[in-house]
Image (tube, rainbow, N blue to C red):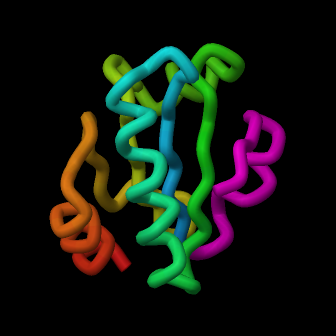
Amino acid sequence: MKIINTKEFNEIKNEGNLVIDFYADWCGPCKMLSPVLEKISADYPNVNFVKVNCDNDEELAMEFGVMSIPAVFMLKDGKVVNKFVGSQPESKITQLLDESF
């Protein structure tokens, strides 16, 4: 999964299906979720999976109202269609993805 900044997000946010993982390097649950999202991303070729480091891009995290991490947002053509906070099991994440896209 590619780590992006605010500028890169603004370039891709309206292009189809997007999953954004807001994380921080010091966050234990974020480290648990990351490999799960990496694995799942291979099964969803029509979805762009990206990561945003909250410590580096605080403005973007604030724009999404991120209060706890990990926070994952699912966007379709620039609109949030689903989200979850905290590390979730793979089955729950795929269920949310299937509902969203």
Left or right: 1 with respect to 76? right
Q: Quadrant of residue 81?
A: bottom left
Among the 4 quarters of the image, the one containing residue 18: bottom right
Which is nearer the eye, 7 or 68?
68
In the rendered image, the quadrant that contains the C terminus is bottom left
Question: Which residue is rendered at x = 63% and y = 19% of the image?
Answer: 59
x, y (%) of residue 76? 48, 68
* Residue 77 x, y percent position in the rendering: 55, 69
At horizontal 59% and vertical 75% (from top left) the residue drawn is 16
The percent coordinates of residue 11 (x first, y second) are 80, 54
Horizontal arrangement in the rendering, residue 59 relative to residue 47 (left or right): right
Residue bounds of the magenta highlight: 1-16
Instruction: Indicate whether residue 45 is drawn in magenta.
Output: no
Q: In the rendered view of the protein, which quadrant contains the N terminus?
A: bottom right
- The residue lying toward the viewer, choosing from 33 and 47, is 33
Magenta span contains residue 14? yes
Horizontal placement of 35 versus 33: left or right? Answer: right
- Which x, y percent locates residue 6? 74, 35
